[in-house]
Amino acid sequence: MKRFSLFLSYAFCVIAFVVFFMMCIALPVLGIERIATVPHAADHAFINYLLSYLILILVLISDVFLFMLLYSIRRDRFFTERSVHLLQNISWAAVAAGFLAIPLFFFFIREALFISFIALFLGVVLRVVADVIEKANEIKEENDATI
């Protein structure tokens, strides 16, 4: 069951890479359609593109960190400092993406508020999980030192 779960996780990461590259290609096309249909959207096109690409870069960084975390799990290195740092980096990237999505809401992209909330919530949850794993790592090292 563990192997199947890891396979699904790796498959999700690969799909995320594919979606990332598709979004990099599709973003200008979608933006041009949006500029043509929404009044005053052309005034804020540069900011929309900049924020959207910054969010996509944060998604790519998070996906790379997730690959590294899955590799550590595959090597049976769960409770390590590296795993904690990878989870913390993923959580900070999610929080940053959430904050970057908030201004998009004010530039006529109504879905950005929902995306922002989800990203911020995910970042907070991952931060809590990272803290729990960090504490478990401390307990594990203390037990290893005792024996």
Image (cartoon, rainbow, N blue to C red):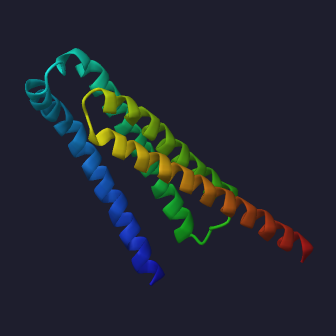
Q: Position of residue 113 (x, y in %)?
A: 35, 40
Q: Position of residue 49 (x, y in %)?
A: 27, 26
- Residue drawn at x 63%, y 67% is 77
Q: Is residue 19 above or below residue 48?
A: below
User: Is 96 on the left or on the right of 134, as rendered?
Assistant: left
Q: Is residue 125 above or below residue 29?
A: below
Q: Nearer the viewer, residue 106 or 130?
A: 106
Q: Position of residue 136 (x, y in %)?
A: 73, 67
- Residue drawn at x 85%, y 68% is 142
- Residue drawn at x 78%, y 70% is 140
Label count reads 0
Q: Is residue 10 above or below residue 60?
A: below
Quadrant of the frame with the N terminus: bottom left
Quadrant of the frame with the C terminus: bottom right
Q: Is residue 111 above or below residue 103?
A: below
User: Is 100 on the left or on the right of 69, as rendered?
Assistant: left
Q: Quadrant of residue 41?
A: top left
| Residue sitting at the far top | 43
